[in-house]
C-alpha cells in the first residue's frame, strides 16, 4: 500500500516548480532577469529550511527513497553548493551577456537530480536522478552558445554521460537478472547477490559512477569539460555530481557488500583511488590553465575521498562526507576566483595571468590562496580535516599503505597549489591593469568560503558529528 | 595576576589574534602595523614571564595544564601544558619575536602589513607547537608555521627567494606528512591496547609499540623513523640540510632570525620530546646512526662555512655545525649531555639570531652580503664591530659566554659514553673559531679597500636595542648557567631516568 509521503519531498517539488517558473518568467517578463539569481537563491535557501524543519522518516514510497540522515546531509550539501554557485553566477552571466532564466531553471533541476540520487534506495530511482542531473548539465556546459570551447564541453560531457548512463543501465539490468530486484535493501538480503553475474553488474555500476566522479581511468573528459564550461557551471559540476555519485557508491557498496565480495571490491576501489591520486596530481603539475589544473586536482581529490570508501565502515563514510563538504568550499572558492579573474570566456585562464593580483584584489586572492592551501591539506583549514579523516579511516582499516600513498600524493600536489600562491603574491604585477573590479557577489562568496574553510578547520566538531550521524544510518 | 586564568593559551593565541585583526586594518597605516605588532610581541613576552613566574622547577612533569574539549568523538582534545623541556624554548621564542620586529623596523619597507601578520601567525604556531601535548594539536601547530614562513621567505626574501621558499615548504611537508600517518597509527595502536582512542602525549607514554627483528617488520622502528624524519629535516640533520642554506640566506633578516633561532629548535625539541620518550628501544638502536650523522654535520658544516663568500650563507652553514652538537648531546645519552643540548638550543638561538641580526644591519646599509665587499669596518663602525665580536665569541664558545657552557656540557657528557665522537666533535669547536674569526678578520680588520664603506653609518640606537637583550643573556648564561639549567633539570632527569 503506497502512502502519499509527498511532504517528505516538498523541497524537491518546490525547486522543480521554481525552475519552471523561472524559464517562463524569462520568456514573458525579461525585465526581471536581474532578479533571477536572488529569486533562485531564496528558493534554494527555503528548500534548505524545509528540509531541516521536517523530520527524516527514513525509507518512504515502498522503500525506494530513503529520506534519512545521509540523504539530509547530501541535500544540505547540494543546496549549499548551489547557493554558492549562484552567488558566482550572476555577475559572471551579466558580464558575458548570458543572463537567461534557463540557466537558473537548469541549475535547480540539476540540483534536484543530485538530491534524488543521494536519497535513492532503488537503482531505477538512482538512474532517474542521474539523468535529470546529467541532462541539465549537458545544456549548462554549452551555455555559451557562441563559444566553441563551451560547445565542445557540452558535447563531450553528453557523449561520456550517455555512455556512462548506458553502462549503468546495463549493470542494473544484469543485477536484476541475477537477483530479481533493484531495491538496494532487498539486494542485501538476496542470496544470489554474490554470484559472478552480480559481481559483473556491480563492476559496471561502479564504472558508471566512476565516470561521473572522473576517477582514473575514467577521467579523460574532465579537463576539457572543466575548461570549456562557463566557470560557475564548472564550479557546480566539480562538486555536486561528485558528492551525489559518492553517496550512491557508498549505498551500493554498503548493500552489495556481503562478506564474499569484500576483497574484490576493496582491491578494485583501491586501484581506482591510487590511480586517481597519482595521475591527477602528476598531471596537474604540467597544467598552465587554472581550470584544467583544478580539473586534474579534482581527479586527485576524488581519489582521496575514495580512500574513505575503500576503508568503509562508519569511519570511512564519515570521512567521505566530511571530505566532500570540505571540497565544496575549497573548490567553489577557487572557481569563484577564476570567474573574477577571467575577463572574457574566450581567454584561457592562465596561471601566469595571476601575477601580482594578490596585492591588487586582496579579498578574492586571499580566498584563492587559502583554498589552495586547503586543497593541499594544510591545517588549520577544513581540507586538512577531510584528509585527516579519510586517512584515519584507512589506518583504522589496517591499510596504512593506502594512507602513505595518499600523503605522498598530497605532497606532490603541494607543488602546484603553492605555485598559484607564488604567482598571486610573489610575482610583480604586469603593466596591464585589470579591466574590471571584483564583483561584490564574488567578494561575498570569497568571504563565506574563507570563513567556512577556517571555522570548519578549527572547529570541525559540528561537521564531524553531522557526518557521523549520517554515516551511522548506513555503515552497519 | 590572578585574573589570568589561562596564561598558556593566552600567550599562544595573542599574537595570532592580533595578526588576524591587523589583517582588517588598511595597509596604509604602516606605523600602526609596526607598533601593534611590536606591542603584541612584547605582551607575549610579558605573558611568558608570567608563565615562568608560575612555573615550579621542582616538579618533573607537566604543569599549568589547560585543556578543552575539541573533537571528542575522535579522541582529540585541546591540551597545552609546559614542563622543564619546553619552558626555555618558549621563553626564547617570546624573546626573539620583539627582536625581530625591532630589526625589521627599517629593513622592511614594502608590504609591512603582510609581513607583521605573517610573523605574528608564525609566533602562534611556534608557541603552540612547543606547548601542545595532544599530538593532533601539535601537528596542527606544526603545520601552521609553514604558510607564514613560505610567505616571509617568498615575498620579502632575496633574489632566489622563490626557489628557497618552495624548497622549504616541500622539504618540511615531506617529513611531516609521514609523521601524520605515524600519529594516526599510534592512536589506533593505543586504542587496540587500551580500548579508547587518544591522541594525548601523556597517554601515549604508557604505549609501547612492538619491536621485532628487521626494520620493516618492527612497528616501533617504523613509527620512530616517521617521526624522526620530520624532525631531522627541521633540525636539519646532515644530509637532509640542503634546504637550510637557501632558506636562511634568502629570507629577510627577521625571517632568518626566527628560522635559525626558533624553528630549527622544533626539530631537536621534537626528537627529544617524542622520539626519545615514545620509542625508547628504537631510540637506543638509532643512537649510533644519529651520533655518526651529528659528527659529520659538525665537521662538514664547519668546513663548508669556512669556504663561503656570502656572510649569511656562512652563518647558515655554521648552524648545520652547531645543530650537529645538539644532536650529538641528545643522542649521546646521559643527563649532562642532554642538559647541555637543551642549553645549546637556547645558545644557538641567541648567538645565531644575533649574527643574522648584525649581518642584516650592514646589509641594510650596503645591500650586499659578500664578504669581499667589506674590510676595515672597525675604523668606520667601532660600536658595531664590538657587538659583532661579542656575538662571534659567543658563537665559537669563548669561556665566559654562553656557547662555551653548552658545548662543554655536551662534550663532557658525550665523552663518558662515546669518547671518539666527543673527540671528533671537539674539532668542530676549533674549526668554528677558524671560520668565524676569519670572517671577522676579513670584514672588520683588513684594509679599507672599498670607498663606499668609508661613509657607513654607525649602528643606531634601535638596532642596539634589538641586540641588547641577546647580549645580556649571552653573558648571563656564560657566567651563571644554573639559572637556566635548574629549570630543566628535573624534567631531563625524569626523561633520561624513565
Image (spheres, coloured by chain):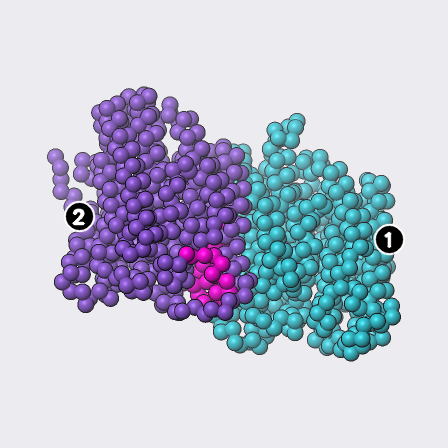
Whole-angstrom CA distance, mark 2 to mark 1, is 84 Å
Indicate the secondary structure of the residue bearing disc 2.
Answer: helix
Q: Residue at x 82, y 40 (%)?
A: B418
Q: Colour of chain B?
A: cyan
**Numbered badge on residue A7:** 2
Q: Residue at x 28, y 63 (%)?
A: A97
Q: Which residues are magenta?
A: A348-376
Q: Quadrant of the N terminus of chain B?
A: bottom right
Q: Residue at x 87, y 68 (%)?
A: B446
Which label number is shown at residue B24? none
Q: Chain of mark 2?
A: A
Q: Position of residue B238 (x, y in %)?
A: 72, 46
- Position of residue A60 measured from the top left corner of the image (x, y, whole percent): 20, 39
Residue A464 seen by the camera = no
Question: Does the magenta-highlighted stretch encompass residue B260?
Answer: no
Residue B97, quarter of the rendered image? bottom right
In the rendering, which numbered label is found on residue B430?
1
Asked if one can make out residue B146 in the rendered structure from this viewpoint, the answer is: yes
Apparent side of residue B419 relative to residue A150 in the rendered image (left or right): right
The vertical placement of B257 against B112, above or below, is: above
Query: Residue B122 appears in which quarter of the rendering?
Result: bottom right
Amino acid at each position: 500500500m503506497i502512502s502519499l509521503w509527498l511532504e517528505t519531498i516538498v523541497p524537491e517539488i518546490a525547486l522543480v516548480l521554481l525552475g519552471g517558473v523561472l524559464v517562463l518568467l524569462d520568456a514573458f517578463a525579461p525585465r526581471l532577469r536581474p532578479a533571477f539569481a536572488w529569486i533562485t537563491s531564496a528558493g534554494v535557501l527555503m528548500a534548505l529550511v524545509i528540509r531541516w524543519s521536517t523530520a527524516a522518516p527514513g525509507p518512504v514510497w515502498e522503500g525506494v527513497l530513503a529520506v534519512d540522515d545521509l540523504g539530509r546531509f547530501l541535500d544540505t550539501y547540494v543546496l549549499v553548493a548551489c547557493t554558492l554557485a549562484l552567488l558566482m553566477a550572476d555577475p559572471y552571466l551579466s558580464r558575458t551577456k548570458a543572463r537567461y532564466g534557463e540557466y537558473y531553471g537548469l541549475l535547480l533541476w540539476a540540483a534536484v537530480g543530485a538530491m534524488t540520487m543521494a536519497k535513492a534506495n532503488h537503482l531505477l530511482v538512482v538512474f532517474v536522478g542521474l539523468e535529470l542531473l546529467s541532462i541539465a548539465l549537458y545544456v549548462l556546459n554549452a551555455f555559451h552558445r557562441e563559444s566553441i570551447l563551451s560547445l565542445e564541453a557540452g558535447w563531450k560531457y553528453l557523449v561520456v554521460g550517455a555512455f556512462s548512463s548506458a553502462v549503468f543501465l546495463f549493470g542494473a539490468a544484469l543485477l536484476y537478472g541475477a537477483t530479481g530486484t533493484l531495491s538496494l535493501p532487498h539486494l542485501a538480503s538476496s542470496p544470489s547477490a554474490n554470484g559472478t553475474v552480480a559481481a559483473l553488474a556491480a563492476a559496471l555500476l561502479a564504472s558508471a559512477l566512476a565516470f561521473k566522479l572522473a576517477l582514473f581511468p575514467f577521467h579523460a573528459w574532465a579537463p576539457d569539460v572543466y575548461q570549456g564550461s562557463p566557470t560557475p557551471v564548472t564550479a557546480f559540476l566539480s562538486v555536486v555530481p561528485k558528492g551525489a555519485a559518492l553517496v550512491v557508491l557508498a549505498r551500493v557498496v554498503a548493500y552489495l557488500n556481503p562478506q564474499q565480495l569484500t576483497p574484490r571490491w576493496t582491491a578494485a576501489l583501491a586501484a581506482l583511488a591510487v590511480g586517481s591520486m597519482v595521475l591527477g596530481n602528476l598531471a596537474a603539475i604540467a597544467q598552465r590553465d587554472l581550470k584544467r589544473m583544478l580539473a586534474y586536482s579534482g581527479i586527485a581529490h576524488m581519489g582521496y575521498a575514495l580512500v574513505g570508501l575503500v576503508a568503509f565502515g562508519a569511519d570511512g563514510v564519515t570521512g567521505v562526507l566530511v571530505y566532500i563538504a570540505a571540497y565544496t568550499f575549497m573548490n567553489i572558492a577557487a572557481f569563484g576566483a577564476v570567474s573574477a579573474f577571467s575577463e572574457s570566456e574566450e581567454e584561457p585562464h592562465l596561471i601566469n595571468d595571476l601575477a601580482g593580483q594578490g596585492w591588487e584584489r586582496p579579498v578574492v586572492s586571499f580566498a584563492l590562496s587559502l583554498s589552495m592551501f586547503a586543497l593541499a591539506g594544510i591545517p588549520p583549514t577544513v581540507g586538512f580535516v577531510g584528509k585527516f579523516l579519510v586517512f584515519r579511516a584507512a589506518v583504522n582499516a589496517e591499510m596504512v599503505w593506502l594512507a602513505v600513498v595518499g600523503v605522498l600524493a598530497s605532497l606532490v600536489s603541494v607543488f602546484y597549489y603553492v605555485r598559484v600562491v607564488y604567482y598571486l603574491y610573489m610575482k610583480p604585477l604586469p603593466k596591464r591593469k585589470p579591466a574590471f573590479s571584483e564583483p561584490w557577489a564574488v567578494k561575498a562568496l570569497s568571504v563565506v568560503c574563507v570563513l567556512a574553510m577556517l571555522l570548519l578547520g578549527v572547529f570541525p566538531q559540528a561537521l564531524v558529528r553531522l557526518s557521523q550521524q549520517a554515516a551511522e544510518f548506513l555503515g552497519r | 595576576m590572578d585574573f589570568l586564568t589561562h596564561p598558556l593559551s593566552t600567550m599562544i593565541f595573542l599574537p595570532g589574534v592580533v595578526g588576524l585583526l591587523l589583517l582588517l586594518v588598511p595597509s596604509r597605516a604602516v606605523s600602526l602595523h609596526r607598533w601593534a605588532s611590536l606591542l603584541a610581541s612584547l605582551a607575549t613576552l610579558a605573558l611568558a614571564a608570567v608563565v615562568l613566574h608560575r612555573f615550579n622547577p621542582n616538579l618533573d612533569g607537566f604543569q599549568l595544564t589547560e585543556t578543552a574539549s575539541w573533537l571528542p568523538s575522535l579522541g582529540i582534545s585541546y591540551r597545552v601544558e609546559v614542563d622543564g623541556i619546553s619552558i626555555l624554548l618558549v621563553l626564547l621564542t617570546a624573546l626573539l619575536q620583539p627582536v625581530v620586529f625591532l630589526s625589521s623596523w627599517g629593513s622592511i619597507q614594502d608590504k609591512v602589513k603582510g609581513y607583521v601578520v605573517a610573523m605574528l601567525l608564525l609566533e602562534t604556531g611556534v608557541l603552540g607547537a612547543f606547548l601542545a601535548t595532544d599530538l593532533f594539536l601539535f601537528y596542527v601547530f606544526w603545520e601552521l608555521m609553514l604558510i607564514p614562513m613560505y610567505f616571509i621567505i617568498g615575498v620579502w626574501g632575496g633574489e632566489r627567494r622563490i626557489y628557497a621558499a618552495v624548497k622549504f615548504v616541500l622539504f618540511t611537508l615531506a617529513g611531516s606528512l609521514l609523521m601524520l600517518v605515524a600519529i594516526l597509527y599510534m592512536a589506533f595502536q593505543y586504542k587496540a591496547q587500551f580500548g579508547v582512542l587518544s591522541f594525548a602525549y601523556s597517554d601515549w607514554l604508557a604505549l609501547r609499540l612492538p619491536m621485532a627483528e628487521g626494520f620493516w617488520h618492527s612497528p616501533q622502528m617504523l613509527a620512530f623513523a616517521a617521526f624522526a624524519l620530520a624532525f631531522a629535516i627541521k633540525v636539519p640533520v646532515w644530509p637532509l640540510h640542503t634546504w637550510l642554506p637557501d632558506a636562511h640566506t634568502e629570507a629577510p633578516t627577521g625571517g632568518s632570525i626566527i628560522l635559525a633561532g626558533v624553528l630549527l629548535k622544533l626539530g631537536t625539541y621534537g626528537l627529544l620530546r617524542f622520539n626519545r620518550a615514545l620509542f625508547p628501544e628504537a631510540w637506543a638502536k638509532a643512537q649510533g646512526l644519529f651520533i655518526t650523522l651529528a659528527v659529520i654535520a659538525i665537521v662538514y658544516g664547519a668546513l663548508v662555512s669556512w669556504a663561503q663568500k656570502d656572510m649569511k650563507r656562512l652563518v647558515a652553514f655554521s648552524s648545520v655545525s652547531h645543530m650537529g652538537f645538539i644532536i650529538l648531546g641528545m643522542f649521546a645519552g646521559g643527563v649532562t649531555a642532554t642538559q647541555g643540548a637543551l642549553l645549546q638550543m637556547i645558545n644557538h638561538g641567541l648567538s645565531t639570531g644575533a649574527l643574522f641580526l648584525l649581518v642584516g644591519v650592514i646589509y641594510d646599509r650596503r645591500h650586499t652580503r659578500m664578504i669581499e665587499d667589506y674590510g676595515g669596518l672597525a675604523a668606520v663602525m667601532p660600536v658595531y664591530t664590538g657587538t659583532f665580536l661579542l656575538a662571534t665569541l659567543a658563537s665559537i664558545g669563548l669561556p665566559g659566554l654562553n656557547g662555551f657552557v653548552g658545548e662543554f656540557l655536551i662534550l663532557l657528557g658525550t665523552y663518558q659514553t662515546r669518547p671518539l665522537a666527543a673527540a671528533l666533535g671537539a674539532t668542530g669547536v676549533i674549526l668554528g673559531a677558524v671560520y668565524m674569526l676569519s670572517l671577522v678578520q676579513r670584514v672588520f680588520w683588513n684594509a679599507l679597500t672599498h670607498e663606499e664603506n668609508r661613509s657607513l653609518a654607525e649602528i643606531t640606537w634601535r638596532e642596539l636595542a634589538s641586540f641588547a637583550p641577546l647580549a645580556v643573556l649571552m653573558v648571563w648564561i656564560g657566567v651563571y648557567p644554573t639559572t637556566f639549567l635548574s629549570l630543566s633539570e628535573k624534567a631531563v632527569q625524569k626523561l633520561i631516568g624513565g
